Image (cartoon, rainbow, N blue to C red):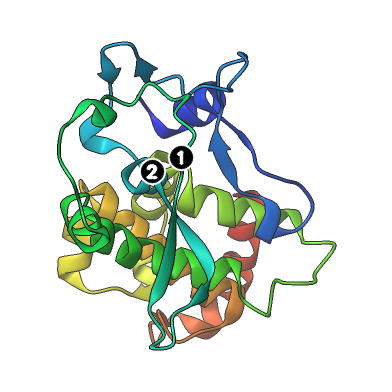
Amino acid sequence: MRSGRLRSERAEAAGSGTVNDSRFMLKMKEDEYKSCPFLTPEGCIIYEDRPWSCRMYPLETVPRKTKRGADKFSLITENNIPCLGFEQDKEWTVTEWLKDQGITVYNKKSQPFMEITSSKNLLGEEDIEPAKKELFYISLYDLDRFRRHLFESRFFSLFNVEKEVIERIKTDDEELLDFGARWLKFSLFGENTISFKDDALEKNMEELDRRRENL
């Protein structure tokens, strides 16, 4: 399923207003429990690609650290979700569970996203330019459109991007998402995650502004 179609059919806005609130979440079923649309009596139909929150379940993070600065967790005891994992006769430690579910990899992947959405440059802004909101959206949620923007425009003639990165983002969505975070940090905050090519900076500033407005 293309990312644009996935957004329109399976997601809904998590909020409105600032870029920090222009995020999306999975659209749940309209039943008593707001059940996940991918969960069936036979189990999860996207199990291998399930998101972070599903991998964590039945653990949830607690908003405070241990004395050593480690994360703390609590156990969700409500059992109204037909998770087949409850039927397994096996005991897990927290460390074993996090490792088995690949949480470390997911935390690493989500770190740039968390840095962007919690940035002091965005927090507290009430009126965000539509172009910024659109830039935020396509870079993180509409990867098919973002890829087209990169390869069907003069993007790589304007910016210094490693050749190996260009090759990887042609087909690898995870690499493209990582690059999207780099692009957002540069374009929204002016961070040194990407740089202009020497001969392109002055000649193409006006063109870049027009492209941002037309995203």
Q: Callout 1: few (<14), some (14-19), or many (20+) C-alpha neighbours within 10 Å?
A: few
Residue 184 visible in image: no
Three-letter amino acid code at the position of disc 1: Thr
Coordinates of residue 178 in the picture (x, y in percent): 34, 63
Q: Quadrant of residue 25?
A: top right
Coordinates of residue 33 in the picture (x, y in percent): 58, 21
Q: Answer with left or right where residue 90 lies relative to residue 195.
A: left
Residue at numbered disc 1: 77
Q: Answer with left or right where residue 192 lies relative to residue 29.
A: left
Q: Answer with left or right where residue 108 lies relative to residue 166.
A: right
Residue at screen point 48% across, 54% down: 139
* Vertical relation: 42 (above or below) 202: above
Residue at screen point 33% across, 26% down: 83
Three-letter amino acid code at the position of disc 2: Pro
Q: Quadrant of residue 84?
A: top left
Residue 90 visible in image: yes
207 or 1, nearer to the observer = 1
Tag 1 near tag 2, CB within 8 Å: yes
Q: Answer with left or right where residue 213 lies relative to residue 155.
A: right
| Count of residue discs | 2
* Vertical relation: 3 (above or below) 43: below
Residue at screen point 76% across, 47% down: 16
Residue at numbered disc 2: 58
Work out which residue is located at the far right of the displayed protein and give it. Answer: 126
Coordinates of residue 51 in the picture (x, y in percent): 36, 42
Q: Callout 2: few (<14), some (14-19), or many (20+) C-alpha neighbours within 10 Å?
A: some
Q: CA distance from mark 1 to mark 2?
A: 8 Å
